[in-house]
Amino acid sequence: MSNGIELDGIGTFVLDDRMGWPVGERQLDVTPLGVTGVFVLDDPDADLDLASAAMRRFIALSPADLATSTPHVHAYYHDSVEAGWAPDLALSSPDDVWRHVTPPREFVVHVRDGVAHVQLECECAWEPEHGLDLVFRDGDTISKVGQFDGHLHHLDRDVVYPGSP
């Protein structure tokens, strides 16, 4: 890893002394999020083919792809307000929830049990302590929405957000 590793279409990764994880050197545009950022591999020994395929699918997402997570993000916001630990932001529609989300500049890639996940720990206005965790299985399928808790899925792996309609 001292010279870095090259991932086709993604760029070179070098070991970050601070985190101990390989970090991409190239800033990549993530159009649906409206940000540029770098990928971080949480395991230097991860399956690089799975990881790079997930990264390429993630940066190819469209705004319509991200919109599939809107009902889940809105449900998380709504549950937080109903529980009394979040302010009512007076949203005029579920889509307005995105105006209160700040995406990260680092996209963490985890490879577990033969599946790559891209995880985003976002800041959000309604839950400043735990934020908004968005996880994309294989880089292109939203598989978890909720507070950041270090997990890549909920207890029921088939549930994106437990309070979703």
Image (cartoon, helix red, strand yellow):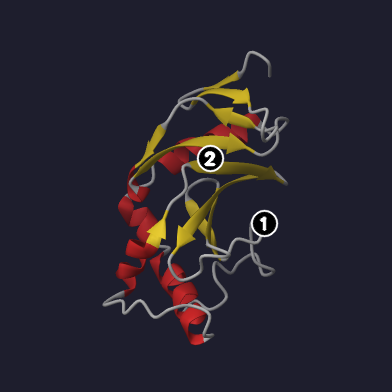
Q: Secondary structure at mark 2?
A: helix
Residue at the spot 52% in from the left edge and 85% down from the top edge: 84
Residue 154 lies in what quarter of the image?
bottom right
Please state if 108 lies on the left or on the right of 87 as rendered. Answer: right
Residue occupied by mark 2: 54
Q: Give amino acid for label 1.
A: Gly
Residue occupied by mark 1: 150
Residue in front for this viewpoint, 150 or 141: 150
Badge 1 density bin: few <14, some 14–19, many ≥20, Cα 10 Å: few
Residue 100 got which mark?
A: none
Residue at the spot 31% in from the left edge and 79% down from the top edge: 90
Query: Compared to 28, does 68 lie above or below?
Result: below
Q: Picture coordinates of residue 103 (x, y %)? A: 43, 51
Query: Compared to 50, does 15 lie above or below?
Result: above
Residue at the spot 37% in from the left edge and 64% down from the top edge: 100
Q: Picture coordinates of residue 156 (x, y %)? A: 67, 70
Between the C-alphas of marks 2 and 1, the distance is 19 Å
Q: Give amino acid for label 2.
A: Ala
Please state if 163 lies on the left or on the right of 31 as rendered. Answer: right
Q: Picture coordinates of residue 162 (x, y %)? A: 57, 75
Q: Picture coordinates of residue 52 (x, y %)? A: 55, 32
